[in-house]
Image: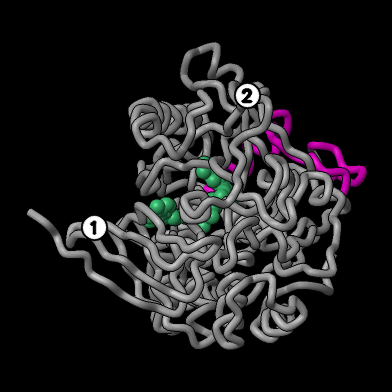
Amino acid sequence: MTQQIKTLHYDVVVLGGGAAGVAAAAAAGKNGMRTLLVEAGPMLGGELLSGMSIDGLLNARGEYVVGGISDELIAECKDMDGFVGPLHDYRLICYVCCDPEVMKIAITRVLARYKVTPLLYTLCEDVVTAGNRVSGLMLVNKGGRTLVTADWFLDCSGDGDLAAMAGAPFEISDPSGDLQPLSLMFRMSNVETLPLLEFARSHPENLAVGESDYIRGNRSDRELAEQIYQQGQPCVFFKGNGPLIQQGLRDEEIFPTALIMIQPTSTARKEVCVNATRVARNINGTDSAAVSGAVAELMDQVWMAARFMKKRVPGFANAAFAGIAPRVGIRETRRIMGEHVLTGDEAVNARKHRDVVAKGAQHVDIHQDDIKQVRIPIANGGSYDIPWGCLVPKKLSNVLVAGRCLSATREGMGTARTMGPCMAMGQAVGTAAALNVQHGHTNARQLAVTELQARLREQGAVLDGVH
Ligand SMILES: Cc1cc2nc3c(=O)[nH]c(=O)nc-3n(C[C@H](O)[C@H](O)[C@H](O)COP(=O)(O)OP(=O)(O)OC[C@H]3O[C@@H](n4cnc5c(N)ncnc54)[C@H](O)[C@@H]3O)c2cc1C
């Protein structure tokens, strides 16, 4: 049976509804664009729904280095009692914890405010190009095929699908061939905070603390554990080479892992998210069969970790298994090469750039196999700038990228991939697309960065004035 291809037209089309895509679509809509947000999955939010903290919104000094659309999402979470707060890990960073169930509603509200049209259950399978210009995306879903045309296309697919299909150069991994492990988050409710914190305070040898000079100061592990206790939240990171996990390994009660990270998701449900699982076989996240093949092992690890927590970690004895993240977490795939390539050195040295359009503050964070993980702090607890050129792919005129697939080295992406900077980059490309449409630009390089910066500042983005 021959199917007819439907056609649609929008000012701006955003591919991918994760942290970057939600912010990009909201920003484009806020700036007057008819915007379509295309998402392969059944819900918008990507990893914002996994229960993990939103990292990179604040620097380690506790200053917000991202604002604007992220503030609007957080305000909605607060309005629905789904905000735990900015917290400190007394290790490397400060982060924001929200209830992922409430976040689902918050995202929908913010996108509705700016009249963004969502298109779920829909995969972009191809692009239509004319020279260095993309004129349309070929979408496929249960209704058949649709060609959607637009003036500007924003690749927020995490994997850089759109830009790669359109011919932008990209890299995966580095000469090592390594790729960060896959992980599956899970949540446990009815967790008693006090026994957990008392255990943390009395056994600092188990904790990952004071990994940046700025945070450690002259403080001992015991003093940092006391800070974690005083914070009063179930916010504890057990290190893979500490006695708790090492004994668990000898007893075959847990698998090798760099950290068991416990972070709050809901005070009302006494619920935490646990980030512990990992399958480190250099699986390429764009290989759906390989990712699917890791699911059973990840599920086994989830259950093993939950049992371990109940048996060995004070505060978890009466905890209930409360849910698994909506999808396998993929940390690393394509990095689209753009006019500027963010490096790890720029990030850890807190480099500032004249053409800043977003910021990041998370340490360079590259998970490896076994109990290994590269963690390099940002100098003096500060933040670094993400220049405009990181979002402008080489060889393409009307495509911008934001989020995990930004133009960066492996180390640069190892920090900028966190959800705070992803949202900041999303806001930058959504706003840039709107300005381009308004000026009739056909090439991203025609846009005056100063104009983009002015509009971003007006709409709450943080580009300066913080460390
Ligand atoms: C295990 C793990 C732990 C992490 N821990 C943290 C943490 O604690 N804090 C933190 O801030 N960050 C953390 N990160 C990093 C962060 O979550 C991600 O890098 C970030 O969310 C990426 O956002 P994004 O919008 O770029 O991509 P994504 O969230 O991946 O969104 C991309 C979206 O695009 C859709 N898509 C992709 N291709 C197509 C296509 N062809 N057609 C249609 N739709 C498509 C996908 O379905 C997806 O929803 C973690 C990541 C992982 C995997």
Q: Quadrant of the C terminus?
A: bottom right
57 sits left or right of 403 in the view: right
Q: Is mark 1 within 8 Å of ligand 1?
A: no
In this rendered view, identify the residue nearer to me: 332 or 434: 434
Mark carried by residue 216: none
Is there any visible trace of residue 256 in the rendered image? yes
Q: Which residue is mark 1?
A: 141
Is there any visible trace of residue 226 in the rendered image? no
* 1 or 2: mark nearer the eye: 1
Work out whether 292 lies above or below 442.
Answer: above
Q: Give the image location of residue 358, x and y in percent.
A: 70, 66
- As drawn, the residue found furthest toward the left would be 1
Residue numbers of the magenta segment = 193-221
In this rendered view, identify the residue nearer to me: 277 or 329: 329
34 sits left or right of 374 in the view: left
- As drawn, the residue found furthest toward the right would be 218
Q: Are marks 1 and 2 in contact (CB under 8 Å)?
A: no
Number of residues whose C-alpha sits closer than 10 Å to that of mark 1, classed few (under 14), some (14–19) or many (20 or more): some
Q: Which residue is mark 2?
A: 371
What type is the residue that disc 1 sits on? Asn
Membership of 195 in magenta stretch = yes
Work out whether 402 lies above or below 414.
Answer: below
Residue at the location (63% across, 65% down)? 425
Q: Give the image location of residue 420, x and y in percent.
A: 62, 61
Residue at the location (21% across, 65% down)? 5
